[in-house]
Amino acid sequence: MTAVTFDPVIEQARESLFKRFTWEKGHADVWRIFLDGSTFAAIVAGLAEPWRAAGITHVAGIESRGFLLGGAVANELAAGFQAIRKAGGMLPDPKIGTTTALNYRGLSHNLYMQDALSADDLVLLVDDWAEKGSQAAGARDLIEQSGARFAGVSLLVDQLDDSMRLKLRRVTSLVRAEELGDSDAK
């Protein structure tokens, strides 16, 4: 049995997320966490906390909420930010790209990023929610294509199955999806 350790930074982030999170007509509304400065700051600190001693050089984020969270966590960790765009987004060359496996809606995405990382870089992916993990796995592939090392993922909400969690190496999250209750009841 693993001992549970209490981290006040992560606990404050969890409390802030629960306070602001709502279901709207069966859909998760995570945008509300960005509305209040102290809530947003607590959540960013909570996402960064497990990774502070990891030697992260860059934080990657997939547009759009991954840009908001990833950029803020990069600042918190004094790291660079690597934008991962979806098809149609502007990004200067040179670029590398990949196509993801199907997501929870049965769609795949074309992801791409600037080819600007190196073997010296250790990259953390930050995002709001991972259901099946197809975009996170695609981001991992891009990061590794660039020659950089993929550290893992920091999420607001983890809904991954165990096999995907293993593929993503280390996954930290503020909450698991089941902690948010039933979306249909809201």
Image (spheres, rainbow, N blue to C red):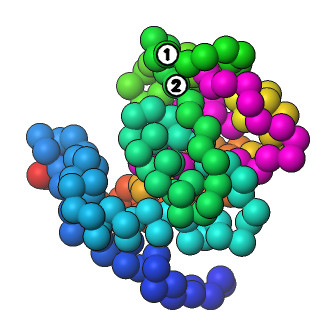
Is 136 within the magenta?
yes
**Location of residue 162 with respect to 15 vertically, above or below:** above
- Quadrant in the rendering for residue 52: bottom right
Inspect the image, locate mark 1, and give the three-letter code of the amino acid beneath it.
Met
Q: How far apart are marks 1 and 2 (CA)?
A: 8 Å
Inspect the image, locate mark 2, and give the three-letter code of the amino acid beneath it.
Arg
Q: Which residue is drawn at 39% across and 41% down?
A: 65
- Between 11 and 85, the one nearer to me in the picture: 85
What residue is pinned by disc 1? 90
Whether the residues at callouts 1 and 2 have beta carbons within 8 Å, the answer is yes
Is 74 within the magenta?
no
Report crowding for label 2: few under 14, some 14 to 19, many 20 or more residues within 10 A (C-alpha).
Answer: many
* Residue 102: image location, x then y, percent: 52, 23
What residue is pinned by disc 2? 85
Q: Is residue 100 left or right of residue 36?
A: right
Where is the N terminus found, in terms of image quarters? bottom right
**Location of residue 76 with respect to 98 vertically, above or below:** below
* Residue 133: image location, x then y, percent: 55, 39
* Residue 126: image location, x then y, percent: 53, 49
Q: Residue at x 56, y 30 (%)?
A: 84
Span colored in magenta: 112-141
